[in-house]
Amino acid sequence: MHRGVHAAIRPGFHPGTSGGVEQYVKGLARALGALDGADRFAFVGDRIQRDALAPFVHGAATWVALPESRALRLKIWFAATRPGRVAVKMKARLPRSTAASVAAIPRAPQLVDETYDVVHYPTQGFELTPLPSLYQPWDLQHLHHPEFFSDAELSRRAAYEVGCRRAAYVVVASSFVRDDVVSRYSIDPARVAVVPPGAPLTSASLPVRSGRPYALYPAQTWSHKNHERLIDAIAIMRGRGTEVRLICPGQPNARDTEVRAHAASRGVRDLVEFPGHVTDAELAGLYAGARCLVFPSLFEGFGFPVLEAFVAGAPVACASTTSLPELAGDAAVLFDPIDVESMADAITRVWEDDGLRAALIERGHVRASLYSWDHLARSCRALYLAAAGLDLEPDDETLLVCAGVSA
């Protein structure tokens, strides 16, 4: 039996605004906590993250709070008040040079550097540390579609390359992102581990949404989420005589007004509902009642909603871009997300063909069975051990081989 690894995990998300990344950290905490052995996994963060993760941290996983400096208390105030949120948004619009952002990558807290064997950054944020580290960039969308990002956002994302180059292992959720990281940053493929997550859908749900059947698209209205073209497809279907009600939950952002106006201009505002942020239980209820999931995103490093739909038994129509075909396999009807006629045809097939719907639901359950939080946790533990230079068990070595990396 190997000496237990003592790993620090830096949550790095903003509760309620980080979508699938937040769900990933919660799933990772729960799964690491369930592992047997002498290993210990400390989630090290601030009071806001502690409150969000509290129901998921247990067993071998613990919570460690950072000392609350004046800057940290100010950050917490920003997140909790309307004036603070406005100030953060205004600051984010200010241009910053790429060179300055790389030079300004923060250092890991001294508590982390002096206490742990290895540190894991499961979100896009990266810190400078003398410890061996794991880094998860999730995707490199900013290199493919810089037009979707502000100068400040592009500046922050310049740190992705530093994180990929300095980490002992880069962890990604799909082979698509692995190939992108290797190609764009000339990273040794033996350091890029493909370890998909499980499905972040809560088992508890509110009553199924009543009323007319609906298609579901849970996503914030960021440009790459492609809401406008989906609305165009809904309008095309209405013109053909097929009325598809569309529900689009997601944390409100600055583009909401623009997307709503687009729905009105296409004459389908009555068909499209934007309920804003919903709880995990409310989202589970929406999946349970949906006639289908439509996922027209232009760029995804993984695509949690597709996996959630498979688990919930909702048939899927999704874009044929980036990582999505890899995730969907034969369990979804794929379409070109730029071609609104193709999108409308795919949605119509899933909406109207009961035989196809039943087949997709069955295939979706099979696909969902391939994704496991336990596998993710055991794979991360193997990576922690390898990065820290500790002894590996045979199962650890097998998991590293499955992830495509070497110790």
Image (cartoon, helix red, strand yellow):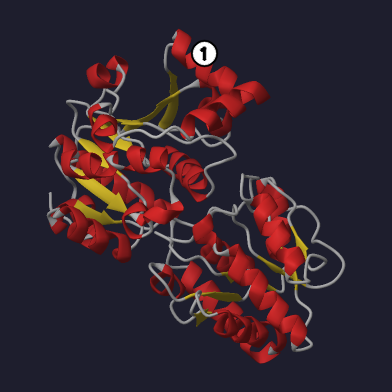
Where is residue 189? Give x, y as percent: 15, 58
Horizontal and vertical percent position of residue 138: 36, 51
Q: Is residue 352 above or below residue 293?
A: below
* Dot 1: element: helix
Count the numbered circles shown. 1
Q: From the viewer's perspective, is 407 left or right of 203?
A: left
In the figure, residue 111 lies in which quadrant? top left
* Residue 294 figure quarter: bottom right
State the residue position of label 1.
73
Instruction: Answer above or below: position of 255 versus 351.
Output: above
- The residue nearer to you, when weighing 346 against 311, is 346
Residue at point 21% right, 54% down?
A: 192
Q: Position of residue 9 (x, y in %)?
A: 36, 33
Q: Amino acid at mark 1?
A: Arg
Question: Outermost residue, top direction?
Answer: 70
Residue nearer the viewer, 359 or 142: 142
For residue 248, above or below residue 51: below
Q: Is residue 400 visible?
A: no
Q: Residues within 10 Å of mark 1 (few under 14, many from 20)?
A: some
Does residue 145 appear in this view? yes
Q: Quadrant of residue 6?
A: top left
Residue beneath the point at 24% across and 63% down: 179
Side of 275 where 342 appears, left or right? left
Q: Quadrant of the N terminus?
A: top left
Q: Residue sitting at 52 percent across and 13 percent down?
A: 73
| Left/right of residue 389 with respect to residue 399 in the rendered view | left
Q: Which sits in the foreground, 297 or 375?
A: 297
Coordinates of residue 11 in the picture (x, y in percent):
43, 34
Task: In the rendered view, tell whether residue 379 sits above or below residue 175.
Answer: above
